[in-house]
Image (spheres, grey):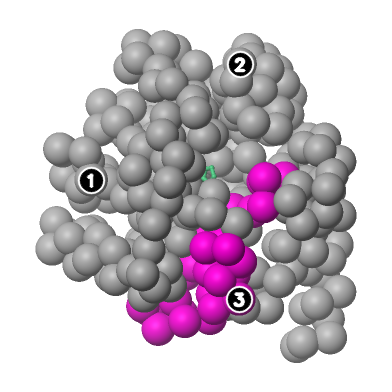
Amino acid sequence: MGVINVTPDSFSDGGLCASTEDALRHAACLIEQGADWLDIGGESSRPGSMPVDMAEELRRVIPVVEALSSMDVPVSVDTSKPEVMRAAIRAGAAMINDVNALRAAGALEAVAAGGVSACLMHMQGEPGSMQADPRYDDVVAEVKGFLRQRLDAALAAGIQRDRLAIDPGFGFGKTHDHNIKLLRHLDRFSDLGVPVLVGLSRKAILGKMTGRNVGDRLHASVAAALMAVIKGAGIVRVHDVKATRDALAVYNAVNS
Ligand code: 9MG
């Protein structure tokens, strides 16, 4: 899944796709590199980021989704707002990627009525303050328990199981040790019975492991994506599609 942030302030590529035209150019590039999904976001969820109002999020995201809806590659929209979900679905989105796991009032209903897929992500707290003091007794058990509850809520709302994915939410209200434990034990999420989506691309956890700044985390990101797939991830959300695909091609050739 290739990332397209239509934002001025995302942590690794803020401003790269500030206009619809830039976003479409970048989409074409990610498709050429072999992306199976494009994930379009109009609100940064990096630690410390501030919410964007609905009109602005719609203005950033919807023209891009509309323009991409005629392409062969399905589009996911990264949003937590039910109004944006509904507009994105009308514009042709095939999946809602919600870092808030459809907890906003009306979000479950928006996805169920739209008949699209959803990724339910775990986050402790909210982006503005989530890295202040994250705490767990057992991070893997607690994140898994939360995702099980959100899956049950999604199923009860009428979203079909084969339209759901889960995500432990690396970097979303987690310390470095929490993130490492989640990656080490990612295989424990597989028995929830839906695909596991993982986003580690260029994140601070990789900066801490390698000492590299955000523009210099390609190799670490590819290693992390490969590790996630070996541990059971079915979808990896990445900035660097070509390099990630090559690494996975080597893995798949040997592993088939
Ligand atoms: C939008 N976004 C940023 N990081 C993410 C991650 O790790 N997973 C998902 N599903 N979305 C993310």
Give the left or right position of residue 16, taking residue 134 as reference. Answer: right
Picture coordinates of residue 116 (x, y %)?
34, 49
Numbered disc in front, either 2 or 3: 3
Picture coordinates of residue 216 (x, y %)?
86, 41
Q: Nearer the viewer, residue 66 or 144?
A: 144
Q: From which residue to which does the magenta span run?
A: 177-205
Q: Say whether disc 2 or disc 3 marks the residue closer to the N-terminus.
A: 2
Q: Which residue is mark 2?
A: 8
Kind of residue at badge 1: Arg
Q: Image point 61% across, 27% down: which residue?
A: 10
Query: For disc 1, does the CB lie below 8 Å from ligand 1?
Result: no
Disc 2 from disc 1: Cα separation: 26 Å
Q: Image point 66% across, 72% down: which residue?
A: 229
| 193 lies above or below 224 | below
The answer to whether residue 136 shows anywhere in this view is: yes
Is-magenta flag for residue 185?
yes
Picture coordinates of residue 248 (x, y %)?
78, 68
Q: Judge the density around disc 2: few (<14), some (14-19), many (≥20) Cα neighbours within 10 Å.
A: some
| Image quadrant assignment for residue 122 | bottom left
| Image quadrant assignment for residue 39 | top right
Give the left or right position of residue 219, taking residue 183 as reference. Answer: right
| Image quadrant assignment for residue 215 | top right
Q: Judge the density around disc 3: few (<14), some (14-19), many (≥20) Cα neighbours within 10 Å.
A: some
Disc 3 from disc 1: Cα separation: 27 Å
Q: Image point 25% across, 60% down: which residue?
A: 150
Q: Which residue is mark 3?
A: 184
- Label 1 sits on a secondary structure element that is loop
Q: Which residue is mark 1?
A: 103
Is-magenta flag for residue 24?
no
The answer to whether residue 17 shows anywhere in this view is: no
Q: Nearer the viewer, residue 170 or 178?
A: 178
Kind of residue at badge 2: Pro
